[in-house]
Amino acid sequence: MLCRLTAALIFGTMLTSLSAAAPPLKALIVDGQNNHNWVETTPYLKKHLEETGLFTVDVATSPAQGEDMSGFKPNFAAYDVVVSNYTGDAWPAATQKALEDYVGGGGGLVVFHAANNAFPEWKEFNRMAGLGGWGGRNEKDGPYVRWRDGKIVRDTTPGPGGGHGPQHEFQIVVREPDHPITRGLPNVFMHSADELYNRLRGPAENMTVLATAFSPKEQRGTGEHEPQLMTIAYGEGRVFHIAYGHAGKQCQSVAFIVPFQRGSEWAATEKVTQAVPQDFPGPDQPSLRP
């Protein structure tokens, strides 16, 4: 009897330890279609979330472009945060409504790079993303948003939404240093060669621009400081939007990894518990992880 009791106590202790060690948050990455290489980037996104020790990660992959989408119905409500790595065919109306209800009801959403190209006709997605590009977007979809003379400016000048020049290294400049996502980061840090999105436009409602990058005209840019890290309040939920991270190489940049990790935790919990790592870059040189 004593042996059985001792074994039961040991087993119970092991279960408690395993439970305590289990990541408390659940993340869902949505992919399957994209004008970028989602097959390459999704494993990076999954790895980056898991290595924080905070997340377990599932992936919901849609049917291929042009295939029947009617059965694509991820259970968003089962997760603390949804990461969109998706640009492609429209989702079924029920799936769109499920995401709206999930985020509006208090869920977290991360919009990753080209996911802001998605769904130009879906009004509520554009409200969640704050800004988007391409897909016929123009002044009807909302203003350009830029940092000018020490403040955010909403520019209603007519013109297309979405653009970038050739890939090049660029500095990220923090504009909201007291936000949980950016708190403790250097005021300026260097990102590896990437697409610097410019001319994004959209509703930009309840949006906070955390960081910008200067888009030089000699790189087919705008000569403006363009939003790169943003948060959006949508109903009771939270959205983190990171506009860079083109492919696997760019997803190895610490200037991408750390804001993505911190932004995902914030979208899930409204808090950030992660310390800034030693390899985080300064203003002059990017930092890459294998």
Image: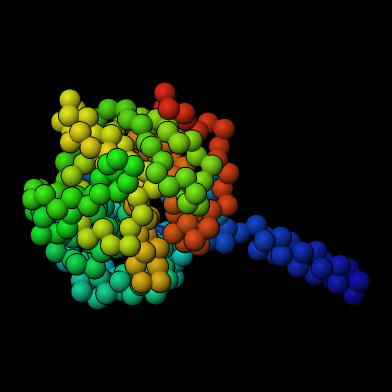
Q: Going by the image, does 133 lie left or right of 2? A: left
Of residue 93 and residue 135, the one placed in the foreground of this image is: 135
Compare residues 288 and 213 and report the one nearer the observer. Answer: 213
Say which quarter of the image contains residue 11.
bottom right
Name the image quarter holding the C terminus: top left
Image position, residue 178 (x, y; %): 49, 49
Work out whether residue 94 or residue 220 is closer to the camera in this orientation and state it.
220
Residue 212 in view: yes
Looking at the image, is 242 positioned above or below residue 235?
Answer: above
The residue under the point 16% across, 41% down is 163
Residue sitting at 32 percent across and 27 percent down?
169
Q: Identify the residue at the far front of this view.
A: 149
Q: Tell me: 223 left or right of 182.
A: left
Residue 171 x, y percent position in the rendering:
36, 31
Kindly identify the residue that appears in the image at 19 percent across and 67 percent down: 123
In the rendering, at what x and y percent does residue 197 appear?
Answer: 23, 41
Viewer-closest of 49 and 279 = 279
Residue drawn 37% across and 36% down? Answer: 172
Residue 275 location, quadrant: top right
